[in-house]
Amino acid sequence: MTEALLEARGVTRRFGGLTANENVSITLERGKLHALLGPNGAGKSTCINMLSGDLAVSDGHIHYKGREITGLSAPQRSRIGIGRSYQRTNIFPGFTVFENCRLAAQSRRQRAWRLFTNALSLEDTLEKARAVIAEAGLEGREDRIAGTMSHGEQRQLEIAMVLATDADVLLLDEPLAGMGSEEASKMVELLDRLRRTRAILLVEHDMDAVFAVADTITVLVNGQLLASGSPAEIRANIEVQQAYLGEEAFHV
Amino acid sequence: MIFSDRTALILKLLGVSALAGYPLVGSEFYIELVAKVLILAIFAMSLDLLVGFGGLVSLGHAAFFGIAAYTVALISPEYDPANLWLVLPASVLAAGLAALAIGLLVLRTKGIYFIMVTLAFTQMAFYLFHDTALGGGSDGIYLNFRPEPRVGEWMPFDLAEGHQLYYFILAALVAVYVLLGFVLRSPFGRVLVGIKSNEHRMRSMGYSTFHYKLGAFVLAGALAGLAGFLYAVLFGFVTPELLSWHESGHVLMMVILGGMGSPIGAMLGAGSMVALEEGFSLLTKHWQLLMGLVILAVVLFLPGGLIALPARLRGLFARGDHHD
Ligand SMILES: Nc1ncnc2c1ncn2[C@@H]1O[C@H](COP(=O)(O)OP(=O)(O)O)[C@@H](O)[C@H]1O
Ligand SMILES: [Mg+2]
């Protein structure tokens, strides 16, 4: 039995005359990692932006746990359990790594009215921040100013921050891009573990990684859903190979 | 921070002691001037909460200062002193409510548009008092008696007496400073700084940033109201100029001069602004020109404001050492 957590039904997004996503349907199930493939400009980020509420849909519907959420704002979607990371690192560059993660963790119990409580005394938040720093492989770098770290470390932080929000659905926009190969393989292991209790949508260019971890693969080209299926089906799909992967892209 | 926590605490205690001791040695004129500085320091700290911590550059902050000042003048009886414990909360509440109403509208805009709409609102408030009979028109109105802190028959202190009013204002300043200290350490304060750094990410992590900004706007408006209330009580006279955009710009310059993002900086800004204005006006009647030059120099050569001066000096000396 699988549990569909997030469902996009025929979503479309237009930018003026350009249709960045046309009638795209995607279902994310708990326990499954769904990879989204496609060349640059195919509309992958736009798709994630619509699911996360960063962009409004031009058409179509989005459901979460059986409830329509098309009209919810990004913060509302985050609070009900939809978390995301960004293709272009989107952190708090002037804060320490710890504060970046602590702020992310604090979002789960915001306690905005507790004006006389020291934020640094909220143990649940601190513990969560420490845990995700360890999970993302950033131990020992808690006090580094985020903006001064290497690009790869900032990518790890980007993931740590999503994890700190305890999301049930993770929308990850090219999380591995820019990471060192060791960090990347650790991150793939982490995704593999996380997937057991959550639903993950992964945009990734590294084919080996995608075919190794994905349960389902959807291919997007020019904003259109070209194919969707198991890795084996996608591999066999000749149309996909021509349109996107190219013969030499497969070293199988 | 360049000073250790202990040194900082000692410096703060010294500062408060010096201010507390000042009425014992100062002349009436200067006691009133320092009291005015203390009030402006509260005003500047309240604006710094928006500008320095929330990243919200408001050019309309004087509206809340002025609304509270008018409130106490308007609700006080003409021939009797009002009760402090009524008019103080009422004035602060009026400013806070005005901030809530205005904030609901202006916080929907960002950046340059935010500056423009806050400016527009303060101009509206200015003309409301300037062009209608509501508060005596362009002449303003008098507050004939300072409010009494009466509790039944008991009068714990007497604001009609200059020194006691001075200490009341000093106590208000310390209270606001302590309050802001708590707020900035709280989850709310952390979110505010996060919004200044990267509002987009704050939203995608689940923070409804509009509500946080509104909370900050109301708190800052209420604290500006406290300053406006004290101003009306100190001078016994309220004019529409108090809510003009000049006044908003004035307090913004104090914050920039002292250094944004630091309540102590805001206080330093208020103090040095008044000191420079007084000093320059003794020298020349073109003192505003000199004032402009000072602000320009600070922005160009000391971007962090006066509060950043110790760190800058230390940096200079440290570099000097390397040359040896
Ligand atoms: N905010 C925007 N405004 C206008 N055009 C956009 C915007 N975002 C994306 N696009 C366009 O939509 C198309 C899809 O972009 P994107 O979703 O970023 O693709 P991908 O992530 O697959 O590389 C591109 O042609 C891009 O230029
Ligand atoms: Mg993209």
Image (cartoon, rainbow, N blue to C red):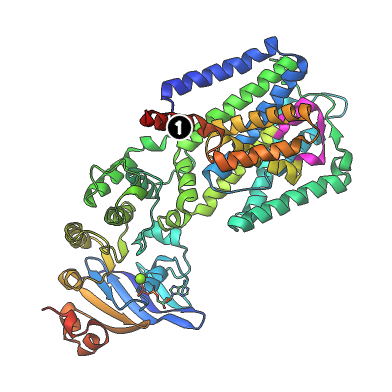
In the image as oriented, which residue stretches furthest toward the front?
A: B324
> In front here: A190 or A16?
A16
Residue B278 lies in quadrant: top right
Residue A85 lies in quadrant: bottom left
Q: Position of residue A244 (x, y in %)?
A: 26, 83
Q: Position of residue A64 (x, y in %)?
A: 37, 68
Position of B187 compared to A102: left or right? right
Quarter of the image with the N terminus of chain A is: bottom left
* Residue B232 shown in magenta: yes
The magenta stretch is B228-242
Going by the numbered disc 1, the residue's amino acid type is: Leu
- Which residue is under mark 1? B316
Quarter of the image with the C terminus of chain A is: bottom left
Mark 1 element type: helix
> In front here: A67 or A194?
A194
- Point 22% across, 65% down: residue: A31
Residue B293 lies in quadrant: top right
Q: Quadrant of ligand 2?
A: bottom left
Position of B133 compared to A191: left or right? right
Instruction: Specify the principal SS of the magenta part.
Output: helix
**Residue B148 makes an appearance in the image:** yes
- Point 76% across, 24% down: residue: B147
Q: Position of residue B314 (x, y in %)?
A: 44, 29
Residue B38, compared with residue B22, is above or below; it is below
- Point 83% across, 29% down: residue: B143
Residue B59, compared with residue B18, is above or below; it is below
Residue A28, compared with residue B226, is above or below; it is below
